[in-house]
């Protein structure tokens, strides 16, 4: 028999980026334990619309834990209480009758609030545009086994590529750092043969864009990894730092040699 629960929601409401937002409280009665968290919000919004009130704005798309759109801070935790779970895959059976739930948007200067729980994550897109791609013309699709890739490298590249760009790492970090996101995007290209020609230039450009966007610095709290729904390892951050250091040293050596030759 399906269990229902009566909940109290404290939801952040904000009309726009320049407005002063605040929490508003809503009753959510008779919520089925089988609903996802976003389905619960859908029900709340239907009731708000029926009462002639503004529905709560929140992001969603695939609702299958793939797209990374459903970024909410639930009771102080990005994506909610369950590890390795996106908000859309969080189900109400993990809450109890009578619970009070606080729902907020990602909190980061680089993720400005657009409305209510919706933030602008365009900063991530601009980081990718700065260098998160392979520009080498490889011609037509090569034969699958024509370019051998070591199994450990292929596995690690796939682990990094699992990043869905949701921004939970930023929301969880006390410094609002995007290092885990940048490290994952740089690593899944830099670990493969096709990504080697631009490996170090890519890292420099992506880190420079990250800094320009106003993200904070990594100070090894590891909250990013704990909040990541795809369990991306902080080991990738160490790899990013090594690549950035090497790129900086090589560039400095080149400049010194060029200057000396002149």
Image: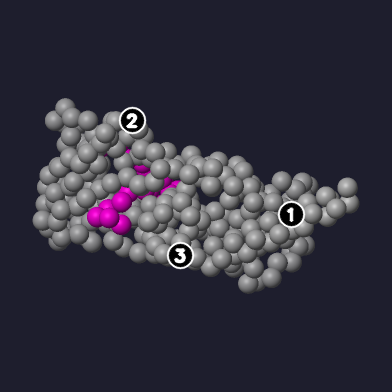
Asked if residue 54 lies in the magenta stretch, the reply is: no
| Residue 118 image point, x, y percent | 35, 39
Residue 2 is left or right of residue 200, and the answer is left
Residue 150 is left or right of residue 81, and the answer is right
Protein image colouring: one colour
Could one spot residue 75 in this view of the protein?
A: yes
| Residue 89 image point, x, y percent | 34, 55
Magenta residues (range): 56-77
| Residue 71 image point, x, y percent | 36, 48
Which residue bears the numbered disc 3? 220
Name the residue located 26 percent from the left edge and 33 percent from the top edge. 20
Name the image quarter holding residue 22. Answer: top left
Q: Which element carries disc 2, helix, strand or loop?
A: loop
Give the alpha-carbon distance from disc 3 to disc 2, as whole Å.
Answer: 32 Å
Give the alpha-carbon distance from disc 3 to disc 1, as whole Å.
Answer: 27 Å
Quarter holding the N terminus? bottom left
Name the image quarter holding residue 142. Answer: bottom right
Residue closer to the observer: 132 or 243: 243
Residue 18's tag is: 2
């Amino acid at each position: 028999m399906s269990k229902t629960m009566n909940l109290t929601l404290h939801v952040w409401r904000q009309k726009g980026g320049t407005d002063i937002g605040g929490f508003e409280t809503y009753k959510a009665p008779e919520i089925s334990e089988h609903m996802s968290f976003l389905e619960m919000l859908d029900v709340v919004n239907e009731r708000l619309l029926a009462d002639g009130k503004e529905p709560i704005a929140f992001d969603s798309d695939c609702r299958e834990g793939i797209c990374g759109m459903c970024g909410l801070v639930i009771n102080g935790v990005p994506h909610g209480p369950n590890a390795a779970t996106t908000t859309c895959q969080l189900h109400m059976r993990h809450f109890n009758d009578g619970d009070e739930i606080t729902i907020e948007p990602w909190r980061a200067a680089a993720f400005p609030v657009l409305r209510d729980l919706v933030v602008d994550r365009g900063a991530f897109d601009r980081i990718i545009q700065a260098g998160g791609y392979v520009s080498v013309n490889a011609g037509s699709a090569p034969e699958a086994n024509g370019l051998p890739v070591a199994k450990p490298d292929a596995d690690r590249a796939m682990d990094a590529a699992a990043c869905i760009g949701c921004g939970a790492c930023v929301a969880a970090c006390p410094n609002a750092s995007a290092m885990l996101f940048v490290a994952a995007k740089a690593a899944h290209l830099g670990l493969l043969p096709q990504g080697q020609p631009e490996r170090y230039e890519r890292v420099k450009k992506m880190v420079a864009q990250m800094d320009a966007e106003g993200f904070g610095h990594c100070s090894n709290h590891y909250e990013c990894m704990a909040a990541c729904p795809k369990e991306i390892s902080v080991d990738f951050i160490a790899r990013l730092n090594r690549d950035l250091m090497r790129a900086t040293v090589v560039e400095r050596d080149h400049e010194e040699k060029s200057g000396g030759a002149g």
